[in-house]
Amino acid sequence: MSVSRLRFSFVASLLIHLLTGLNPGFSLAAEPVVKFGAWEYLYGGPVKSLAKSPLKTLDQFRITGAEAKHPFLLNEVVCDGRWQTSKGALQQADGRSAALLLGEARSFELEAGVNAEGEGGWFLLFGLTEGHGYGVYNVTLRESGSPWHLSEFRNYEGVEATDREIARYACRGNEALYVRVVDGKLSVKINRRVLIEDEPLPNYEGGEVILGTYDTNYGPKPLKIYGLRLRRPMAAE
């Protein structure tokens, strides 16, 4: 039986088990020691429904990528979609694009159990305050692979000079995603593949963390979310 057909409780437990093994994959020896607080479960584990989750649907959110008219890269994104749970997975129910507010943070660690297989685009914005922040986005193409991009945003628009491809990786089935921002440096890993590590984020200040899908010529990414948790550094004593 495939993982996608297993009961939600088992899938969530499996993915969280995978997630706990992600952190040692980064070489953090040069980084200052950061003591993180407890995990906040946003979906999965003890949070088994969207109604009981701290996640907030953003059905009037707009963001424009550096390539506003591009048919596949992050473009003029209008998030008008809702989310629903189906077979234990949180996924887009309707609309052209859809977004979820995960919370606010400056430094943070985010772990997720996702299935991002299939065509279309999805994104993660972080440190977004009054339109300024950063984002990572990915699109899967039929003939040109699956590029991942990093971009800075100002006034809710991607800054062309900062938008660049950082990796190529095509998602396959259920995988563990790990994102870490500490002292203005970004690391991203999925399924034990390091996409970017300790990348400086100039002018980064912290703010909202937003996960979403965006419309392309193939439609939005059919993203399935099985687990989401977020933690922030402990307050200084």
Image (cartoon, rainbow, N blue to C red):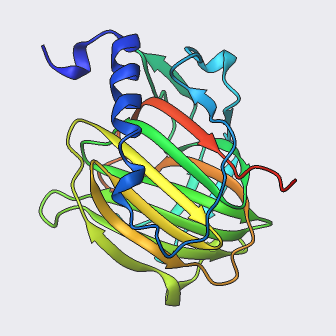
Q: Is residue 221 visible?
A: no
Q: Residue at x 15, y 19 (%)?
A: 2
* Residue 180 spot, x, y in % from top left: 53, 58
Q: Residue at x 61, y 29 (%)?
A: 41
Horizontal arrangement in the rendering, residue 195 relative to residue 215 (left or right): left
- Picture quadrant of residue 225: top left
Horizontal arrangement in the rendering, residue 96 relative to residue 62 (left or right): left
- Picture quadrant of residue 141: bottom left
On screen, residue 190 above or below 196: above
On screen, residue 8 above or below 27: above
Residue farthest bottom in this picture: 161
On screen, residue 173 above or below 166: above
- Picture quadrant of residue 107: bottom right
Give the quadrant of the N terminus: top left
* Residue 91 spot, x, y in % from top left: 45, 29
Q: Is residue 189 visible?
A: yes
Viewer-closest of 226 and 92 = 226
Q: Residue at x 87, y 53 (%)?
A: 237
Q: How many marks?
A: 0
* Residue 235 spot, x, y in % from top left: 82, 52
Q: Residue at x 58, y 76 (%)?
A: 152
On screen, residue 47 above or below 150: above
